[in-house]
Image (cartoon, rainbow, N blue to C red):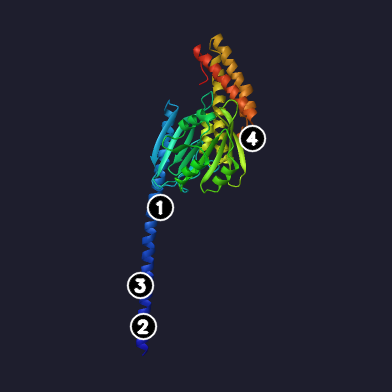
Amino acid sequence: MSSGRRADAETQINWIFILAGGAIFLFVIFKFIGVQRSSSELASAAAVRDRLESAILSSLSTSQLYFEDTMNVEDVRVRASCEEGGIFVSEQLGPVDLGPVFCSASLGSDSGNLFFKSVRWGGPISAGSLIFLASDANSYLLVSNPGYDDMISEVEKMLPKDADVERVGELSTILESINERKGKIVRVAYFGEEPSDEQKEELNNIKGVSLVEIQPGQDRMIGEVVFYNKTGDKKAVPYMGYELLTAAILSENAEEYACSANKAFSRMAGILNVTSKRLALIQTSSSDECKVFMGAVIKNIDEVILPNYLSKFKIEETDQTKITGLYGNLTQLASTNNMLERLSCPTVY
């Protein structure tokens, strides 16, 4: 009787070892598959990161106003956060800083297409490029306003050419266009007029839809973009040039737009500072005629633009008067640069 019990116990122990061994084997297999999948995803993310950095280098080497690239990022979920440091293709790899980038926070899409566009910026002067990103998951509806067709046309030229962009009219057509884009992130932009209470209430209740309103100044190159949130609150932030206007339309919210815009203005300040020092070094060996105009440029940069406008610049804390003053001084700088060019003198850029 005891030998029978011993045999049963041994059988049970053997089954326990078999089950334990099987569990360990399955754990090792699934762990191996997980590691392989993780390695594959990391490799894909690294390839997307390399592609973005390559696009930046290509945009820097071109003399054209625009540089565009459509890239398939497959199943890599790209997200953006200026506050966190840039573009994320993988949390393990960390952010890649592409400079002033303007886009929706999430750039994932079913097809995996990411649209990259580099746009030269600086208003009257050249101050580097702004980077615009969009994907198949994003749509941009530009609300027609007969008095602002020229502005809307400029924005259409600035947006990535493969992005989903449509001009719309009355609320019924806006709702119809949104309904055709279910599951997408839709930005609705109004030009020169505030959306009605009915429009705000109707559109704010739709998931994935956000509103901005463009309020141009007397010179339409300068104005404000008003960002509306789902609670009905709004925040106005200035723009300078159609490039920054388009950048605001692409941006997730006022905070992300301001963060990237401040990077652009900081770079402008750096470029102007280097330009002033360069002209000061070569001024002494220039002709008397050139010295006069070069001296005017140096004075404008060192005594007006940098200390009065770009020192500790924060676009979210800047009013229309200051933006207008900056734009006016940059216009004057560009005019002086044209004179230097005609006289075959060293130029600002």
Label at residue 38: 1
Q: Residue at x 37, y 84 (%)?
A: 6
Badge count: 4
Left or right of 295? Residue 2 is: left
Decide which of tag 3 and tag 4 comes sooner along the chain. 3
- Residue 212: x and y in percent read 56, 39
Q: Nearer the viewer, mark 3 or mark 4?
A: 4
Q: CA distance from mark 1 to mark 3?
A: 30 Å
In the image, what residue occupies the spot 36% across and 68% down?
22
Which mark identifies residue 317?
4
C-alpha separation, residue under disc 2 versus residue under disc 1:
44 Å
Secondary structure at badge 1 equals: helix
Q: Are marks 3 and 4 in contact (CB under 8 Å)?
A: no
Q: Which amino acid is tagged 2?
A: Asp
Q: On the image, numbered disc 2 is attached to which residue?
A: 8
Q: Alpha carbon of mark 4 to alpha carbon of mark 2: how far?
A: 81 Å
Q: Are marks 4 and 2 in contact (CB under 8 Å)?
A: no
Q: Which mark is residue 18?
A: 3
Q: Which callout, 1 or 3, points to the residue nearer the camera?
A: 1
What kind of residue is marked 3? Ile
Could you tell which of marks 4 and 2 lies nearer the N-terminus?
2
In the image, is 318 to the left or to the right of 176?
A: right
- Label 4 to label 1: alpha-carbon separation: 44 Å
